[in-house]
Amino acid sequence: MPYVVRIEDAAAAYPEYRFMTPLTASEQKAAFHVKDADGNDLCLKIIAPDYRVDRLEREIRALQLIAHPNVVRLVEYTFSSRPGSLRHFMVEDFVHGTDLSARLVAGEQWERQQAADFFAALFDGLSALDQKNIVHRDLKPSNIRVRNDGTPVIIDFGLARLLDLPDLTLTCEGAAIGTLHYFAPEQFVGTKHDIDPRTDIFAAGVLLHQALVGQHPFWRLGMSSQEFQDAVCNSEDYKFSGEFGVLPERWRQLMGRLLEKSRARRPRHAAQVSAILRKIRTD
Amino acid sequence: MRRGSWHQFGDRSQKLATEMLGLGTGVGVIISARDLSFQKARHYADIYRGLGAEVLIDLQFYVPHFTNPKLRSYPFGAYRLAIPELCRLSDHEVAGLASPLEQIHSRIGANAVIAPAVAYEAGQNDIAILNARLFHVAKAVGGNLGIPSYATVILGQSTTTSAATMDAALSQATALDADGWYYAFEFSPERVPSDPDTVLRCCKAGLTLACTGKPVLHAYAGPMALLSHGFGSTGAAVGHSQNLWRFTRGRWSRAKRGAGQAPPRFFSTALWGTIIYPDETRRLPADLRAAILTTTEFATPVFSNLRWDRWSANKHFVAAICQKVDLISRNTDPRTCARSAVEVLQSALSLHDRIGATGMSLRDDTNAYQHSWLQSLQRLLTEADADYNYLSLLG
């Protein structure tokens, strides 16, 4: 269940901001497009009272480590408690545009050059995470904003894992959270030690397949969750679809690599994928 | 990491390495802490560098509780513990390894840090975690010294029995943020690995590492260096001792092994194997003998049927392998390198057939592996097509 706060209540609790519209809420956060006193567009997220603060700390730390055009910027994080008043919220840059989910329409295929440009930038963002040893772990269309100029911004680091944290026990529950449709095989069958930047690369590969082919590589209508898991972990049937088959050879090679079941066989660094996409964009 | 053949020697071989480098054979030297004291390592590192070579030091951590007087001369004796004890070290204690590692690498002037690591074993997550902890320390040391840090990936025999266990180990190893890979594969204890499936797995694992886009140094390659660049390695380590021709833990047991008084073996590039000199070479028909006696700077006596000592045979062995491997490595496309190796092996097999037709059988079974290697490479070229394609994409 998403954490919902009425916009009137939010405006009353945070009078220093002008509330524009509610945004898609998650289980942990109610989100709003707001403007500050200087008229800057921001995204204010009110954190649910029962949200795990330890998990939030990871998100805050992750965001504070990164300054990259394809990763959302954290402006402020505040936790204050006074008698009768609890304010626990974070403010990020508001990204004008849409979620990627609005652009990924079943049956519609992107132009390859458009896909190359968009996904090269997305992998640039993932590379920025990789360099800081962060795994997003929940990359999905609703966690990627598309600016009006068509460039992507990775948002919502609620499940991000800092790989160099000494205590990683919180990540054990990774398989119970996140979004199944973009899970890598190791998120279904692995342990916390099996999660690394290549987990995000797999999810981005699923997104790229959706953009180029017009459908999810593994999900089919009517599938049970077990069937879906089996497909993610074992099937390469997507390679036999007509739409996939007509892609230029180097695109198919890259796609096959992104969607490898084994982490060892996926691209090791997101920056390598960006470079390849820029190389093959005109194929 | 420089591309080509690297010298990897045990003890009493430092002058041999110097001689090779003086001739322009080999691009680097891997010093073995098991075989050379810290003081001598520093001395020879300067010489090697002066001869234009890159220098690395392998701290020989594979059987971590093994020690000897040479190893004790390095300031990291406190960490030569059994694997379970190493696993129990606190983060603070593991971090303490940074200081001796930095001291060793800075004094030697190493071109990169080879992270200490133990062999990966199937189903042993604790070993993967230990290797990751050791690597993080090595990475920090490399960062401080401004040099790359190579993760050591030794695939223990338990990981190489199936594609799934090998894949699991490789997934764990390649999770490390390494600047390169120091790679070896544990084979069964035979003189030269000859099982085609196992050799194929060794090649596939190396290719998987190469597909990370980081350089691979194939350690303990020996004659198998012929295959190294064909599976994407940047460097291949060659030494004359048989216990350096494959990774084997016997090297770290205390049992003494003598070479005996056997006559010298002649490494024939054409056979890609050895033949006993002069006993066997003398029995060959003249045309076959001429085809087999491939020359190097150290093989002159054999063409006049003169006496030939074991050290000259060792030098010839290293020079012959390095020179051929360097020739192959001039082409940077792994697929082309693999095809070059295929040609060498096909030609060698044809020569072995001709020897067989004379009714002579080689005493050391030195024709036991060429056919297997050929099969392995041919299967690699077919089965690993996606990997080769991906390497091209990366390139």
Image (cartoon, coloured by chain):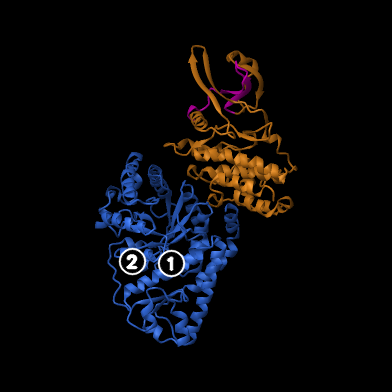
Amino acid type indicated by mark 1: Cys
Work out whether residue B11 or residue B144 is closer to the camera in this orientation and state it.
B144
Label 1 secondary element: helix
Across and down, in percent, residue A61 comes to 49, 30
- Say if the magenta span includes residue A41: yes
Q: Does B58 sit left or right of A184 as displayed?
A: left
> Which chain is the one coloured blue?
B
Is A177 situated above or below B190?
above
Q: Quadrant of residue A155?
A: top right
Q: Residue at x 58, y 15 (%)?
A: A14
Q: Residue at x 55, y 52 (%)?
A: A265
Work out whether residue B245 or residue B285 is closer to the camera in this orientation and state it.
B285
Work out whether residue A206 or residue B310 is closer to the camera in this orientation and state it.
B310
Query: Residue at label 2?
Result: B16
Q: Residue at x 50, y 71 (%)?
A: B372
Query: Residue at label 1?
Result: B322
Nearer the N terminus, badge 1 or badge 2? 2
Amino acid type indicated by mark 2: Leu
Between the C-alphas of marks 1 and 2, the distance is 13 Å
Across and down, in percent, residue B153 comes to 43, 54
Label 2 secondary element: helix
> Which chain is the one coloured orange?
A
User: From which residue to which does the magenta span run?
Assistant: A27-54
Is A247 situated above or below B195?
above
- Say if the magenta span includes residue B392: no
